Amino acid sequence: NTDIALSLIKAGADVNHATKNGTTALMAVASFIHRESDRPDTALALIKAGADVNYANKDGDTALTRATDYRNSDTAFALIKAGADVNYADTALILIWAVRKGNTDIALALIKAGAYVNHADEYGTTALIEAASEGHTDIALALIKEAGANLNDADKYGDTALIWAVRKGNTDIALSLIKAGADVNHADKDGDT
């Protein structure tokens, strides 16, 4: 509740206090699933009071990764606006997470804020490969046309965004990749194109 948070802040509460598992108030607010109308205002109050937007717990979670994980778009936007590092070392996969969860608003905000668009997870999956595979057209188009994503990056199986788009029947994404110059002759590890 924003009113309670403001009262605690006014009374001198440490906005950067972390629990034993490393959760701060800002991280907790970003994790809230209920009372959506309170989240952005409470997050903004904590940020204004000096909450560290880039604090990471021992698992590497930050308020921004939590907001992305819980699909709290307004809180994520507030964090990005306040300078949350969209490329923090332990959270460099945040764009892939947003795409994987189908959170177009957060993914587009991360792209606009300069998130590494070509970073790959342990399977070699990039944000573009994920968007092409899952049919998230708006995100894929932003990655292709605006963010300069590498069109021919391949995952550990040799599959590119174009192969995934074709395989999953995501025609608009496949055509956009072809138009942008994706390698139409790239073969995966099994020799499939």
Image (spheres, rainbow, N blue to C red):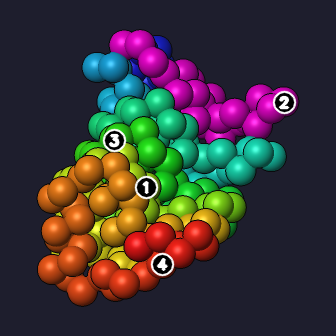
**Residue 117 point in image, percent of width and height:** 42, 71
The residue that appears at 31% across and 81% down in the rendered structure is 184
Name the residue that disc number 1 marks. 130
Q: Work out whether 163 lies above or below 139.
A: below
**Residue type indicated by callout 4:** Ala
User: Can you tell which quarter of the image residue 23 is in?
Assistant: top right
Rate crowding at label 2 as few (under 14), some (14 to 19) or many (20 or more) other CA atoms within 10 Å: few
Residue 53 in view? yes
The first of marks 1 and 4 along the sequence is: 1
The first of marks 2 and 4 along the sequence is: 2
**Residue type indicated by callout 3:** Asn
Spatial CA span between label 4 and label 3 = 30 Å
Q: Disc 1 or disc 4, which is closer to the eye?
A: 4
Which region shows up in magenta? 8-35
Q: Main secondary structure of the magenta part?
A: loop
Q: Which label is found at residue 103? A: 3
Furthest-right residue in view? Answer: 20
Name the residue that disc number 2 marks. 20
Q: Disc 2 or disc 1, which is closer to the eye?
A: 1
The first of marks 3 and 1 along the sequence is: 3
Q: Which label is found at residue 101? A: none
The residue that appears at 45% across and 45% down in the rendered structure is 100
